[in-house]
Amino acid sequence: MSVRDVAVVVVAAGSGERLGAAVPKAFAPLFGSHLLSHALRQIAAMPSLANLVVVAPASHLQEAKDAVVTTGLEATTQVIAGGTTRHESVAAAMRALPEGTSLVLIHDAARALASTELFERVATSVRDTGLTTVPVMPIVDTVKRVEGEQVLETVDRAFLGAAQTPQGFQAVDLQAAHQAATEQFTDDAALMQSLGAQVRRVDGE
Ligand code: C5P
């Protein structure tokens, strides 16, 4: 029987400007529900899930709560309002985590189809190694380094990977990192790495 020792944070408070939808990205429709609902369904099936924090735009707290109830997660979930940046949204969630949380996964709601198995794979890595863990996919495109309109060179893609979420952490480490953060990072693993943490890769999907 597995232990329920994992806190999951779903950040869904972005405006989704690049997507250009009429609603924040996490609430964009997909196959009859919205992106956040799809992500919550995968998380609800995790054998190791202890609790969940959903970070939503202030304008969509009720929609987020409704999705939590529909997924049957209301007993283990807090829904809170996000900040103006992803870092502020994650930092708010870290403050909301129950005392004594050891292991936390941070997930972008926009990655609506990440599987339950992927969440468990990342959690297992953090549990077994204690290391910050990131799912990474090989890059299949030919990658160019560019400057304006000029293509400078082809980069050896054997040494490149595309980072995904959920990313896994020891909760105390990530809490401290977000308190200390002075610059913006596009993911939490980059923040940890900037503070000297070793980061482990598992297969993405
Ligand atoms: O905009 P970006 O692609 O970096 O967003 C990644 C994730 O972070 C999305 O799931 C988005 O909802 C979330 N986010 C957030 N609060 C913000 C900005 C982004 O929760 N202020």
Image: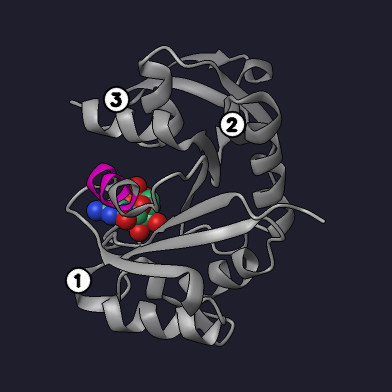
Q: Main secondary structure of the magenta part?
A: helix
Q: Which residues are magenta?
A: 87-93
Could one spot residue 202 in this view of the protein?
Answer: yes
Looking at the picture, which amino acid does disc 3 mark?
Gly
Looking at the image, residue 100 lies above or below residue 132: below
Identify the image's colour scheme: rainbow, by chain, secondary structure or one colour.
one colour
Which residue occupies 47% across, 16% down?
A: 197
Q: Nearer the viewer, residue 27 or 152?
A: 27
- Picture disc at residue 148: 3
At a point 49% along the width and 69% down the height, the residue shown is 76
Q: Quadrant of residue 124?
A: top right
Above or below, 113 against 120 in this view is: below
Q: Amino acid at mark 1?
A: Ala
Residue denoted by label 1: 58
Q: What is the CA distance from the residue labelled 1 to the residue labelled 3?
A: 38 Å
Q: Secondary structure at mark 2?
A: strand
